[in-house]
Image: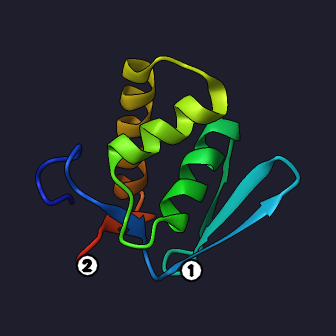
Amino acid sequence: MTGGDVMADRYRARDSVSWQKVDDEMVILDLASSTYSALNGSASVLWTAVVGAQHGATVDGLASALVDAFAIDGATAAADASAFVQDAVGRGLLEVSTH
């Protein structure tokens, strides 16, 4: 599933995934499985950071996005970002970036 180190790996959206912001939610469609997900505010911030990262996003970078958006402490942000990445990889929405 991952390259082995969730904190050091870089993540990107899979090619089969499409997304659109609708009001305050991010709606994600996995074209390969024909499933969709609606992300809440913090997950939307994380998704936006992933797809905006040119060479893939790290958990540390995602945690920084949460700290900036919600003024939460770094440890909480890192735990939330790690959980988000693990869940999204498990759902087939994100993959470890190869570049």
Residue at which label 2 appears: 99
Kindly indicate the quadrant of the structure image that contains residue 78. Answer: top left
> In percent of the image, x 44 and y 36: which residue is there?
63
Question: The disc labelled 2 sits on which kind of residue?
Answer: His
**In the image, which disc is placed on residue 31?**
1
In the rendered view, does 59 fall on the left or right side of 54? left
**N-terminal label among 1 and 2:** 1
Residue shown at the point (54%, 55%) measured from the top left: 49
- The relative height of residue 91 versus residue 43 in the rendered view (above or below) is below
Image location (x, y in percent) of residue 82:
35, 38
The image quadrant where one finds the C terminus is: bottom left
Q: Given the image, on which type of amino acid does mark 1 rest?
A: Leu
* 84 to the left or right of 19: left
Seen as rendered, the residue at the extreme left is: 4
Residue 15's mark? none
Based on the displayed image, in which of its 4 quarters is residue 71 positioned?
A: top right
Expressed as whole percent of the image width and height from the top left, the position of residue 40 reads 69, 40
Residue drawn at the location 46% of the way across and 65% of the way down: 53
Between marks 1 and 2, how big is the CA–CA gap? 23 Å
Camera-near label (1 vs 2) is 2
Q: Residue at x 59, y 34 (%)?
A: 68
Q: Nearer the viewer, residue 20 or 71?
A: 71
**How far across and down, in percent of the image, does residue 58 sit?**
33, 52
